[in-house]
Amino acid sequence: MAGIDPALFRKVMGAFATGVTIITSEADGEVHGMTANAFMSGSLEPPLCIVSIARKARMHDFLLHAGHFGVSMLGAEQADMSNHFAGRPMADLQVRFHHAGRTPLVEGAIAAIAADTSATHDCGDHTLFIGRIHHMACAEGAPLVVHHGKYARVAHMESRGAAPTLEFW
Ligand code: FAD
């Protein structure tokens, strides 16, 4: 990598705290899911969102073929779900999906989006998938957060008048 140490790259990018999502899609009768935090809002008009998927991930070619994807934003109690969909399968984990049109979404998420892929852009060893949003839903709940590779939750401390802090585990 020209001039940038990979360890420094990971350390700097890991300083950017994010939520955690499960990207889902369905093609030829198969549902596939994958944990991703490289997700962002793209545009309000038209409504677009963006997710960055590694070329080496099984999800990459699956999404190119399917042409649509779901984004399920995980709650603070769903770290097991994140680990499961990041390739550390948990045999006793109950994973249920519901659908928005043809797009599967993970049950129990705090917010969800379903989108049709409207464009893809090369991004080195990743591809950016831009989705035209056709469904959004939001439930109550604190988000699962990841920071420097560790899960955290936002600890609201309104009762003591302090700003929210991150609690790690
Ligand atoms: P696999 O590794 O084969 O599958 C993923 C897992 O999901 C497997 O355990 C599988 O059992 C399970 N699974 C899939 N479909 C189903 C189903 N229908 N029902 C039940 N279980 C199912 N990678 C990126 O490219 N972009 C990111 O933004 C990104 N962010 C990440 C953030 C975090 C916090 C973590 C932990 C990982 C992140 N990754 C990201 C890495 C990515 O999640 C893993 O590399 C993942 O294993 C790639 O999945 P895959 O498509 O290759 O499929």
Image (cartoon, grey):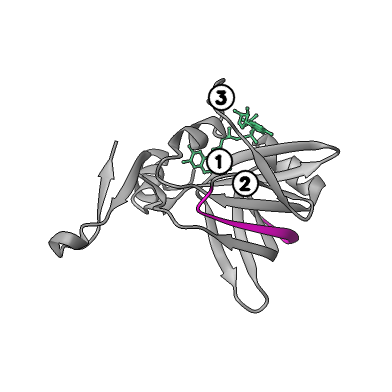
Identify the residue position indicated by label 3 in the image: 89
For ligand 1, the image quadrant comes to: top right
Disc 1 is placed on an element classified as strand
Lower position in the chain sequence, tag 3 or tag 1: 1
> Does 40 sit above or below residue 109?
below
Disc marking residue 35: 1
Whole-percent x, y for residue 138 in the image: 54, 61
Whole-percent x, y for residue 91 in the image: 57, 20
Disc 3 is placed on an element classified as loop
CB contact under 8 Å: marks 3 and 1: no
CB contact under 8 Å: marks 2 and 1: yes
**Cβ of mark 3 under 8 A from ligand 1:** yes
Lower position in the chain sequence, tag 2 or tag 1: 2
Quick one: label 2, few (<14), some, or many (20+) residues within 10 Å?
Answer: many
Quadrant containing the C terminus in the rendered view: top left
Identify the residue position indicated by label 2 in the image: 23
Prevailing secondary structure of the magenta residues: strand
The amino acid type found where label 1 is placed reads Thr
